Amino acid sequence: MAELKEISSNKIFGGYQKVFSHQSKELSCSMNFAIFLPSDSADKKFPVLYYLSGLTCNELNMVQKSGFQQFAAKHNIIVVCPDTSPRNIENLDTSDFNYDFGYGAGFYVDSTVEKYKNFRMYSYISSELIEVVNNNFPTLVDKQSIFGHSMGGHGSLICALKNPGLYKSVSAFAPISNPVNCPWGNKNFTGYLGDNKDEWKAYDATELVGKYNGPPLEIFVDQGSEDQFLKENQLLPNNLIDAAKKAQVPIIYKLREGYDHSYFFIATFMGEHIEYHAKFLNN
Ligand SMILES: N[C@@H](CCC(=O)N[C@@H](CSC=O)C(=O)NCC(=O)O)C(=O)O
């Protein structure tokens, strides 16, 4: 098991907000993740909530902007915030990289394109990181859930839909709900997966929800009505809602009047999301 290196540790709301680095096998590079531990007690175990961030983010956006720690402390939940892509890959031509492709934009897929072979964020999140966290922290191994924002909302939805039973609950802030049909998804899926659009569907929540076959799973989506990316048709929540209804997968959709795509929106509803996950994790 790869060694963890502690980068920082700060006491907050009676718990500890820490950042660690480790050498990832999936991504073949050093990765940072942030982890909130509700207590430093050695004899208690806690459920784990994974949070996936959006384009341009690293492990710190959620930690510094959302105010999640007070709610995680209240409900005794460990929260893990990984980085959003591999970083600093040696000899990689990054001339195509932009804010919405490449570093900070792994899109939570396993690339099938040789050039981007390090970009295996799907396997990193849904397998390797869980093992690293369970092997190093006081977790209840069968009690984990996942949520995220925008690109990370897409990531959380596909991780839950592709791994029935692995997560107890899933929620998303302004997720990219149907990447196969939006500009961000087209750009990233072409880049990481190539031109065969049939292969893209394996990473699209709207496609996957119709195929979901597992323990009952409810999807909770939060969306601001003044979100610029909603207006630019990057998010397409109605496609997910329609597909979920058709597949009889329950979906809660909350359209929040006046909110945009930013962490001001996320911070406003963070308490509601953690309380939602706590219902599933603390029973
Ligand atoms: N103008 C922004 C565009 C990128 C952006 O809005 N990123 C969002 C996620 S969008 C979808 O995944 C974000 O979370 N940004 C980080 C933040 O702290 O707000 C830009 O170029 O940064």
Image (cartoon, grey):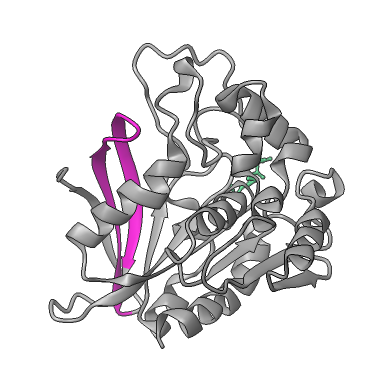
Q: Quadrant of the C terminus?
A: bottom left
Q: Horizontal and vertical percent for residue 64? A: 47, 58
Q: Quadrant of ligand 1?
A: top right
Q: Horizontal and vertical percent for residue 219? A: 64, 68
Q: Horizontal and vertical percent for residue 236? A: 80, 51
Left or right: 251, with 63 as reference point: right
Q: Which residues are magenta?
A: 14-36
Residue found at x 70% / y 29%: 197
Residue 67 vs residue 277, the one in the foreground? 277
Residue 200 vs residue 153, the one in the foreground? 200
Using the rendered image of the protein, determine whether residue 38 is visible from the camera's viewpoint.
Answer: no
Left or right: 153, with 116 as reference point: right
Left or right: 180, with 35 as reference point: right
Residue found at x 67% / y 21%: 195
Q: Is residue 25 magenta?
A: yes
Q: Residue furthest right?
A: 231
Q: Main secondary structure of the magenta part?
A: strand
Using the rendered image of the protein, determine whether residue 95 is visible from the camera's viewpoint.
Answer: yes
Whether residue 17 is situated above or below residue 129 in the rendered picture: below
Residue found at x 32% / y 55%: 130
Residue found at x 26% / y 50%: 20
Q: Is residue 6 magenta?
A: no
Q: Residue furthest bottom?
A: 283
Please state the total of marks drawn on the protein image. 0
Q: Horizontal and vertical percent for residue 257? A: 83, 70
Whether residue 12 is situated above or below residue 232 in the rendered picture: below
Q: Quarter-wise, where is residue 141 in the image?
A: bottom left
